[in-house]
Amino acid sequence: MLASLARAQDCVAPAKPMLRAELLFGRMIGGRLGVSEARWRDYVARELTPRFPDGLTLLDAHGQWRNANGAIVREPSKVAVIVTVNDAAAQARIAEAVATYKQRFRQQSVGVVTTTACAAF
């Protein structure tokens, strides 16, 4: 197991091992800002909040990635940080949130970074 992954015996009470997911959402559609603040708020209200009612953190970001032609593409982005129990249901909710965003906003991908961390709330 990687040293950075939390295990039950590594966490100091009241912290316990939990899933930490960062979802990286690009906002460009067809070369223009297609996911406005209003559309983003609607997505959060309809898709993220119902799936993660215990809480999440939303951040404004500026992302970049290399496209199929090798060019660096930069775009305004959003990051959702979710700390939740690490079970199949949580992982399914993350996958559903990603799939819905991709379909709704015609995105090729949404970045997903997951780790296990000690957390307490």
Image (cartoon, rainbow, N blue to C red):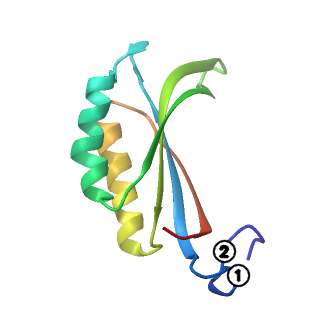
Does 17 appear above or below 58?
below
Which residue occupies 68% across, 70% down?
5
Amino acid carrying label 2: it is Ala
Lateral position of residue 23 relative to residue 4, left or right: left
Farthest residue in the top direction?
32
Instruction: Describe residue 99's horizontal placement relative to residue 31 as left or right.
Output: left
Q: Tell me if I can see residue 104 in this picture.
A: no
Q: Nearer the viewer, residue 3 or 69?
A: 3
**Residue at position x 62%, y 84% from top?**
8
Residue carrying label 1? 10
Where does residue 57 sit, x and y in percent of width and height? 45, 47
Nearer to us in this view, 108 or 86:
86
Q: Which mark is residue 6?
A: 2
- Mark 2: give few (<14), some (14-19) or many (20+) Cα within 10 Å: some
Q: Is residue 41 left or right of residue 23?
A: left
C-beta proximity under 8 Å, tags 2 and 1 = yes
Q: Is residue 52 visible?
A: yes
- The structure residue drawn at horizontal position 41% and vertical position 52%, both measured from the top left corner, is 56
Give x and y (percent) for residue 81.
49, 50
Number of residues whose C-alpha sits closer than 10 Å to that of mark 1, classed few (under 14), some (14–19) or many (20 or more): few
Residue 44, x across and y down, in percent: 30, 41
* x, y percent for residue 52: 33, 58
Front-most of residues 55 and 88: 55
Secondary structure, mark 1, is: helix
Of all residues, the one furthest to the right in this rendering is 3
